[in-house]
Amino acid sequence: MRQTNIFDFLIESFTDNISNVEDTRKQRTNLVYSLKDIILSAFSVFYFQNKSCLSFQRDIDTRKGISNAQTMFGISDIPSDNHIRNMLDKITPNSFKKVYEIILDKLRDIGILDKFYFKDDYMLVALDGTHYHSSKNISCKCCQSKTNSDTGEVHYYHSVITPTIVHPDIKKVMSRLHN
Ligand SMILES: [Zn+2]
């Protein structure tokens, strides 16, 4: 299977899954952007790995009437960055857990996962971790926290472990889902 077909399969599985995500907007009529456009726009930022990518895509969109976001991801209209952020805040990552499993099964079926076996039935997993929220003022019920023993000040944060399947002979890596 060619790379582009895997990409199409990924977008198709991802898009199918969006119908299971609850649209929390109260006003359901006259919505400018569909939930699909919002979620796929956010996903495309990670794909292009450039946070200013969407404004770039919007410029092309205005000038030429077509953009990568539309042709590659099937996005009709690109929402503003703020609108994407506000909407994403209300969506749990668990909504997309199933997509990860579907993609992993596909990679197994077409033999790509097999290439990552390093020794016998074992794969190498590189572990890293990072904080993706850090604040003394803003917190949620899922926050981790640290209290300064001198000042009593509370620091709220979210952290994540990012396991990645790697192989010394392969330049690409695969992120590994974890709970
Ligand atoms: Zn939090």
Image (cartoon, helix red, strand yellow):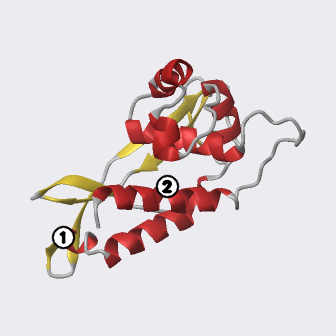
Which residue lies at the image location 70% right of the left edge and 59% below the top edge?
19
Quadrant placement of the N terminus? bottom left
**Foreground disc of the pair 2, 1:** 2
Residue at which label 2 appears: 11
Q: Residue furthest left?
A: 169
Secondary structure of the residue carrying tag 1 is helix
Q: Amino acid at mark 1?
A: Lys
Outermost residue, bottom side: 120
Residue at x-position 65% and y-position 25%: 82
Q: Position of residue 135 (x, y in %)?
A: 59, 27
Q: Residue at x 39, y 55 (%)?
A: 7
* Disc 2 element: helix
Along the viewing direction, whichever of 147 and 57 lies nearer the viewer? 57
Residue linked to disc 1: 115
Closer to the chain start, of discs 2 and 1, is 2
Q: In the image, 103: left or right of 39?
A: left
Q: Is residue 97 visible?
A: yes
Crowd around label 2: few <14 · some 14–19 · many ≥20 (10 Å): some
Disc 2 from disc 1: Cα separation: 23 Å
Quick one: 38 or 70, which is closer to the camera?
A: 70
Measured from the top left, where is residue 174 in percent x and y? 31, 58
**Label 2 amino acid?**
Ile
